[in-house]
Image: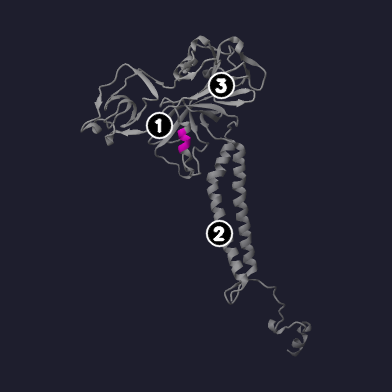
Amino acid sequence: MVPPQDGKICGTICLCQMTAVLSSVALVYLTVAIYMPSMRAFQSGISEVPAMCTTTRAVTKDTCDWGSCGEWCLSKTSGACIQIYVNLRHNGSNIQYANCTNSANKTCYGIDQENAKKYRCIADECKNLTGTFNCTMGMCINITDAFECVFQETEPPLKCSGKRGKITCIELHGLQSCTRGTCGRIKSPYNCDRRCVDIPTRNKNVIILSGDRVFLSQCQRALLAGSEQEIWSQDQDDVFMSSCYSIETTEDGMEASDCINGSTLEKSYLTDLTNFTYLNFLSVTSTKILDESRQIAPPEEDLILANESRLLVNLEGCVNTLRDECREFLKEYGKDGTDHNARARFPCFYADHNRDTVVARFNLAITFREFVIGSTVPSVLFVVSCLTLMLCQRTVEVGDDSKMRFKKKAAAIIPGVVADDITPGDAGGGAHAMAL
């Protein structure tokens, strides 16, 4: 019969050995994954107060020494990657729009490059193209319904239909004007305006542009958020325009954050309905600056800190979750306007001594918490398991039957007397000693 002690002792030793091995491996892995990045974050000098970044370029490199986001930090790839460049600037103004009525908003969708139907010329899918197409190395997307392009001339056309059509158009690239499979590349200069029409501007005196969205309302006044300073009122009998990062509806009206390019526009420039392109045109021309001192909702160029800064998802430029985070990150932050959609605009973090690199994620409180948990838990498990193994080594013995038991207290040994001969109640076994 196997004594109960043997199974429990064996299970305890196996569990402690496994815990000691796994915790030691975890300590080695977390040194690269948590400890070293945390120390770099503490010493980076990056401010926890975010600035604002706008994507200017998203470049795909076949070989690169840095990338904006990688999926596994322990094996940083040296192959293809995407590098995102941004403009770094100070934050704009937060503005409260009071007593707003008759509000409206419209989202002007462009082309979803990822989900849009793609025509592959090598598969002979370009033989019937008609309209305006944006092509990349023989892969074309129809942008006719989303954009209206005005141009003067095209390059000599290529015939994508017929027996050799797919070979002729295998490298079709750039903006193409096609008619029944015959495509000509549109030459510069050209202008492609988004087909976002029927934006209601009647009885609206506040227009806020936010990326691909437009917010319109009839407001009585605009205040600097957090104060009672009035920066605009409806008594001026004009239209207040600005470009803001986000807009929230509150009990007091609308509150917009990071507002720049504040300006006023004469009402005569607007009719009952307008389009997205015309509003963007008016925000640049035919307006006058809101604040002559250029302190409230100033022009964007007054806030620029650095141009063409490198964007990283964090200080390491990689993530370890293996949840395909980088795919979503690059899709959201890599919008550089090349598809005629609005450029990505987002909070970012930087260090004063190094404005050439900015990060999208930075939180010292979370970093400290991860550092404490990542160092305490495996360390405690490693120490407890090792101490338990040492205790077992000193208190457990293997009997003649090859079973493990806790050691019993040793009996007193008298020279010439076998321990089994001493019985309780023998008064110390004196009689046996006398006889011997």
Which range is magenta?
Answer: 327-331
Residue 386, horizontal then vertical, whole percent: 61, 59
Question: SS of the residue at dot 2?
Answer: helix
Of circles 1 and 3, which is in front? 3
User: In the image, is residue 32 above or below residue 11?
Assistant: above
Of circles 2 and 1, which is in front? 1
Is residue 219 or residue 285 the one in the foreground?
A: 219
Question: Residue lying farthest bottom?
Answer: 435
Question: SS of the residue at dot 3?
Answer: strand
Colour convention: one colour
Residue 373, horizontal then vertical, whole percent: 61, 46
Q: Residue at x 57, y 13 (%)?
A: 290
- Looking at numbered disc 1 in the image, what kind of residue is underneath it? Gln
Of circles 3 and 2, which is in front? 3
Q: Residue at x 58, y 67 (%)?
A: 10
Residue at the disc numbered 2: 18
As measured in the structure, the alpha-carbon distance from the residue carrying label 3 to the one carrying label 2 is 64 Å
Residue 190, horizontal then vertical, whole percent: 36, 18
Classed neighbour count for the residue bearing mark 2: other residues with Cα under 10 Å, few (<14), some (14–19), many (≥20) = some
Of pointers 2 and 1, the one earlier in the residue sequence:
2
341 lies left or right of 183: right
Task: Report if residue 306 is visible in the image.
Answer: no
Classed neighbour count for the residue bearing mark 3: other residues with Cα under 10 Å, few (<14), some (14–19), many (≥20) = some
Main SS, magenta residues: helix
Residue at the disc numbered 3: 103
Question: SS of the residue at dot 1?
Answer: loop
User: In the image, is residue 419 above or below residue 393?
Assistant: below
Q: Are circles 2 and 1 on residues that touch, CB within 8 Å?
A: no
Residue at the disc numbered 1: 113
